Amino acid sequence: MTAWLGMQPIATTHGLQIDNLIGWIHIFMLILFVGWGGFFLYAVFRFRKSRNPVADYRGVTSNRSVYSEIGVAVVEAVLLVGFAIPIWAARVEAIPPENQSLVVNLTPEQFAWNVRYAGPDGTFGRTDIKLIDLQSNPLGVDRSDPAAKDDVTTVNQLYLPVNKPIIVNLRSKDVIHSFNVPEFRVKQDAIPGLTIPIWFIPNVTTAEMRTRTGNPQFQYEIACAQLCGLGHYRMRGYVTVLSADDFQKWMDGEQAKLKALETAGPNPFGQ
């Protein structure tokens, strides 16, 4: 419905709902623009000085303007109650169970996106601010904690499986950032001191989108939608949506790297 608005192709199951809402809003905005614009031109012509040289202090006695205002209020109520509130409830309140989803912790900072997966045990391990190292351990993961040994971390690269609910827990290390992937129809601020969950189901892999768009270099891009400092322009991340098998192969590869690092030396994680 929003192709005529030049929006990016949809790559999540809920994307069509968002686009339909945006489309209807623009249609009603167009109707209001034409209606009020036409009324303005009519008023300018109808009450021109040459036709009304003396002011009429009684004004208009018709109730047509009241009816039009009621009509506008009804349309706005329909948009709010019929579209906006149900979508908000579905996206914010109806978060799927974690045991049926992939849970990812996403922690932006000036100027990077830090991604963390719980690993095969499904439990995020302990972190310690004293262990933070911007190069080797930006999240301060404590690898001495058994639950943290299999935690996978990446920077500026978010890998996701297709057709599976994704829960992204957003937090920030410094200032307000905003997680925005246009094709996913997802945008949420990351606020210091808060953990904000968002969820979605990607249904188009990166490879499929490259075929659809005819662009072999296509990437889902994470754009920070908040001006977060002088380096805001270079705060770019990428999402790679894989098939379930390919995602598992990637995760297995990351686990193999962790085991190799663990056996490589006493302090393989810069702690």
Image (spheres, grey):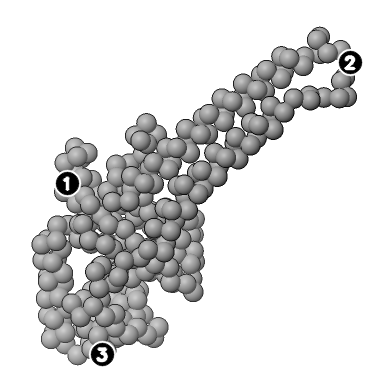
Seen in the image, is 257 located left or right of residue 85? left
Q: Nearer the viewer, residue 112 or 82?
A: 82
* Residue 192 % position (x, y): 49, 71
Q: Residues within 10 Å of mark 3 (few under 14, many from 20)?
A: few
Quarter of the N terminus within the rendering: top left
Is label 3 or label 2 in front? 2
Labelled disc at residue 150? none
Judging from the image, what secondary structure is the residue with disc 2 in? loop
Labelled disc at residue 144? 3
Seen in the image, is 24 located left or right of residue 138? right
Q: Residues within 10 Å of mark 2 (few under 14, many from 20)?
A: few
Q: Nearer the viewer, residue 193 or 140?
A: 193
Judging from the image, what secondary structure is the residue with disc 3 in? loop
Judging from the image, what secondary structure is the residue with disc 1 in? helix
Residue extending furthest toward the top: 50
Is label 2 or label 1 in front? 2
Q: Residues within 10 Å of mark 1 (few under 14, many from 20)?
A: some
Q: First in sequence, mark 2 or 1: give its number.
A: 2
Tell me if residue 111 can be seen: no
Q: Residue at x 49, y 74 (%)?
A: 193
* Residue 169 % position (x, y): 37, 69
Tell me the kind of residue under disc 2. Answer: Val
Tell me the kind of residue under disc 3. Answer: Ser
Residue placed under numbered mark 1 in the picture: 208
Residue placed under numbered mark 2 in the picture: 54
